[in-house]
């Protein structure tokens, strides 16, 4: 039996490699996806092999991640429960897709992930896997082994000589990629506990944020970001640049209690500097380039679209159908947006586009050539017709 393990080199997956070998008497092949976690991945392959893997793929997926996953999602202004910019959620379908591709290439019998049985990631990984390979065997150790928590894993690792970084004093989990970093568990499980500033990674504490505001110009083409301050950048490098700018000004941190797909509430702290800047900048450009009814219709679909990503349905036909509509809505979302970053805030201060629908002659309070104020009377009276009929009927409520 051959099993492809989604491997990070952290506590869970380091234990999983050895556990799979012992439990299934299987050959283990690791796969480590670089999606921008900014960790030193040199040595990960050797660590996987030392732990028991026959080999380990280590692949840089950052450009594909930004181009084919983050940017299409940002075109939709996707946000879950009005707070979460889906940083972890959107990385999972890419990792699972590549996991299946490697399983095919290796003629493997199964794939394995380290997601817990309480979380959302198990759903995201497995829905993608089944969408691509309907008969694949999936091993989820957290649903099988007898370990009850991460401290059990720490002890198992110690007994088996597996080096890990998690300790009893610092048991919260972190997950980082090009879009964000998440903190969950441990001290954060009590929603009254304040987020410890010393564990922040992608945003400065407000007290240490830059004391002077900074203007940043983001240029979009059909809803896809292309340049920052006039400099053309690859998708991944554009994200890195905005992360750097956002970090300096403490932009993009949220502390939320969200509703997991499996039914429970979970507290998480997320840092999403580049994503936050893009979210506000993109919306600012849409304000002058999108038709009102197109915008309102697209906005009405955002909660459903965000749910699909959060719940793991990136490769579902309904998400693909919605994506086609979103892409169509973006065909004139081209231009530049200026945002001001300061002390945790991102404010749109200017927008311009060759496809702008904003007409100053019409919008101005001065002059009557383009807009006759008298026309408003008939407009209002027609819109009030059903209200007047109701007022004259027995349904009168006032």
Image (cartoon, grey):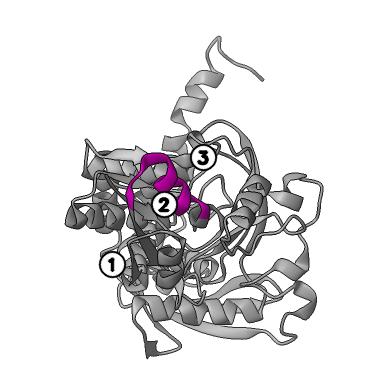
Nearer to the camera, 167 or 280: 167
Height in image: 156 above or below 389?
below
In this view, the mark in front (2 or 3):
3
CA separation, marks 1 and 2? 30 Å
Query: Does the CB distance between marks 2 and 3 fall below 8 Å?
Result: no
Q: Residues within 10 Å of mark 3 (few under 14, many from 20)?
A: some
Specify the segment rendered in magenta: 15-27
Asked whether 239 or 222 is in front, the reply is 239
- Residue linked to disc 2: 375
The Cα–Cα distance between marks 1 and 3, rounded to whole angstroms, is: 47 Å
Locate the N terminus by quadrant. Answer: top left
Which residue corresponds to mark 1?
Answer: 332
The answer for how far apart the CA atoms under marks 2 and 3 are is 67 Å
Q: Which is the main secondary structure of the residues drawn in magenta?
A: helix
Q: For the point 24% across and 44% down, which residue is it?
A: 109
Query: Which type of secondary structure does the marked residue at label 1 adopt?
Result: loop
Relative horizontal placement of residue 386, taking residue 12 as reference (left or right): left
Examine the rendered structure and indicate whether residue 382 appears above or below residue 356: above
Q: Position of residue 315 (x, y in %)?
A: 28, 46
For marks 1 and 2, the one nearer the N-term is 1
Would you identify the image quadrant in which residue 336 lies? Answer: bottom left
Numbered mark located on residue 142 in the image: 3
Residue 1 in view here: yes
Q: Is residue 20 on the magenta stretch?
A: yes
Q: Look at the numbered disc 3 and give the secondary structure of its residue.
A: helix
Which element carries disc 2, helix, strand or loop?
A: helix
Membership of 397 in magenta stretch: no
Which one is earlier in the sequence, the residue at label 1 or at label 3?
Answer: 3
């Amino acid at each position: 039996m051959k099993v492809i393990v989604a491997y990070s080199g952290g506590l869970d997956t380091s234990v999983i490699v050895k556990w799979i070998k012992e439990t299934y008497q299987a050959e283990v092949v690791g796969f480590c996806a670089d999606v921008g976690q900014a960790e030193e991945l040199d040595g990960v392959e050797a660590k996987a092999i030392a732990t028991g893997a026959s080999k380990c793929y280590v692949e840089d997926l950052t450009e594909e991640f930004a181009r084919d996953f983050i940017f299409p999602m940002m075109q939709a202004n996707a946000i879950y429960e009005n707070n979460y910019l889906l940083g972890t959620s959107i990385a999972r379908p890419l990792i699972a897709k590549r996991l299946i591709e490697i399983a095919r290439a290796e003629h493997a019998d199964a794939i394995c992930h380290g997601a817990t049985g309480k979380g959302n990631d198990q759903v995201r990984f497995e829905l993608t896997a089944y969408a691509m390979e309907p008969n694949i065997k999936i091993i989820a150790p957290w649903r099988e082994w007898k370990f009850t928590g991460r401290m059990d894993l720490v002890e198992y690792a110690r007994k088996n000589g597996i080096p890990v970084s998690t300790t009893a004093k610092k048991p919260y989990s972190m997950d980082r990629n090009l879009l964000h970093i998440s903190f969950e568990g441990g001290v954060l499980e009590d929603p009254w506990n304040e987020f410890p500033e010393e564990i922040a990674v992608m945003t400065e504490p407000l007290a240490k944020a830059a004391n002077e505001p900074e203007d940043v110009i983001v240029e979009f083409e059909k809803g896809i970001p292309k340049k920052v301050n006039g400099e053309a950048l690859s998708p991944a490098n554009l994200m890195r640049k905005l992360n750097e700018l956002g970090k300096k000004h403490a932009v993009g941190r949220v502390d939320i209690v969200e509703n997991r797909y499996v039914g429970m509430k979970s507290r998480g702290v997320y840092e999403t500097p580049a994503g936050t800047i893009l979210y506000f900048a993109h919306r600012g450009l849409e304000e002058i380039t999108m038709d009102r009814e197109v915008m309102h219709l697209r906005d009405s679909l955002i909660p459903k679209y965000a749910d699909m990503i959060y719940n793991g349905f990136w490769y579902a036909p309904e998400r693909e159908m919605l994506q086609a509509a979103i892409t169509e809505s973006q065909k004139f979302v081209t231009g530049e947006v200026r945002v001001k970053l300061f002390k945790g805030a991102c404010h749109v201060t200017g927008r311009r586009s060759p496809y702008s629908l904003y007409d100053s002659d019409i919008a101005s309070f001065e002059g009557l050539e383009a807009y006759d104020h008298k026309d408003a009377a008939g407009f209002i009276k027609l819109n009030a017709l059903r209200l007047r009929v109701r007022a004259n009927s027995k349904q009168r409520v006032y």
